[in-house]
Image (cartoon, helix red, strand yellow):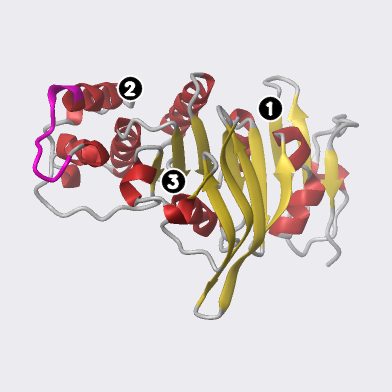
Amino acid sequence: MTVMEAKNVSVSVQDRSILTKCSLTVGRGEFIGIIGPNGSGKTTFLKSLRGIQPISQGQIFLYDHLLTQMTDKTIARQVAYMQQSVKVGFGYSVKDIVMTARYPYIAWWQNSTSKDSQIVEEAMRYTGVWELREKNIQAISGGERQRVFLAKALAQDTDILLLDEPTAALDIGYADDMFRHCQELCHAGKTIVIVVHDLEMAAKFCSRLVLFANGQIVADGEPHIVMNAKNLGKAFHISSTVYEDALFRQRRIYVYPYGVRIRQSQHLRPGVQIPEEASTMILNE
């Protein structure tokens, strides 16, 4: 079942082209990783899917409804968006922040209900921040804040989550946990589109990868199809070998130094061979 669809989406800001004819169909239960170099349009595309970033051309549909014809509250009941960085004023507790996720369900004259409180508590326990609930949001670490804002996205109780680099400030253990949480949620029926810089983490957990370069989608498919040396060379302008880790069965990337003409064998331990199924691309200097 298709839950979101972008058709030939282009975005220009002050006569500068950010996205050019980007199309994507998102199915229910998918865990889609948006990858690509800095400035390639990943965050702009995610904002466009939520309706935060106006598009110059194309169309975006949410459950077959044109996004531009839907109210913000209607969208917010179906799509939660976790932005890359959030500035929060002093005085708000962690629980207060997460409770704001319930705004699509509460009229301006109403107070939150016991059901709202229960949903918020469940989301905070799931992301491991319930014990921080009375703390000032300014008094916790960057990694803890990221888990608080993931709890906020979950407390919005939507079928679709759009996450913009949620693991950026997390230690490796918490980052791994967050990806596992997302994978579990997708197995339970939610749909997640996530912008991520860690390519190996994206390949390990995501069911599908979409590679951006220069404001365009240059590859889209299962991780083992998208994550190859040719595609990485095209998008990131790097020389690399991409191979399957036989011990843990996940994609690994070895990047060769810039501006150095060398043979691959110089980078291998004696007696070690690059697997036949590995892909390698050495860019011409």
Region of the chain picked out in magenta, as a range: 107-115
**Residue 25 location (% of width, % of height):** 64, 42
Q: Earlier in the sequence, mark 1 or mark 2?
A: 2
User: What's the amino acid at mark 1?
Assistant: Gln
Say whether residue 119 is magenta: no
**Residue 238 location (% of width, % of height):** 74, 56
User: What's the amino acid at mark 2?
Assistant: Tyr
Residue 250 - label: 1
Q: CA gap, disc 1 to disc 2?
A: 26 Å
Q: Tell me the residue at 13%/45% (across/down).
A: 108
In the image, residue 56 above or below residue 210: below
Residue 105 - label: none
**Residue 190 location (% of width, % of height):** 48, 27
User: Which residue is the site of mark 3?
Assistant: 168
Q: CA gap, disc 1 to disc 3?
A: 21 Å
Say whether residue 110 is magenta: yes
Judge the density around disc 3: few (<14), some (14-19), many (≥20) Cα neighbours within 10 Å: some
User: Which residue is the site of mark 2?
Assistant: 126
The quadrant of the image that shows the C terminus is bottom right
Q: Earlier in the sequence, mark 2 or mark 3?
A: 2
Helix, strand or loop at label 1? It is: strand
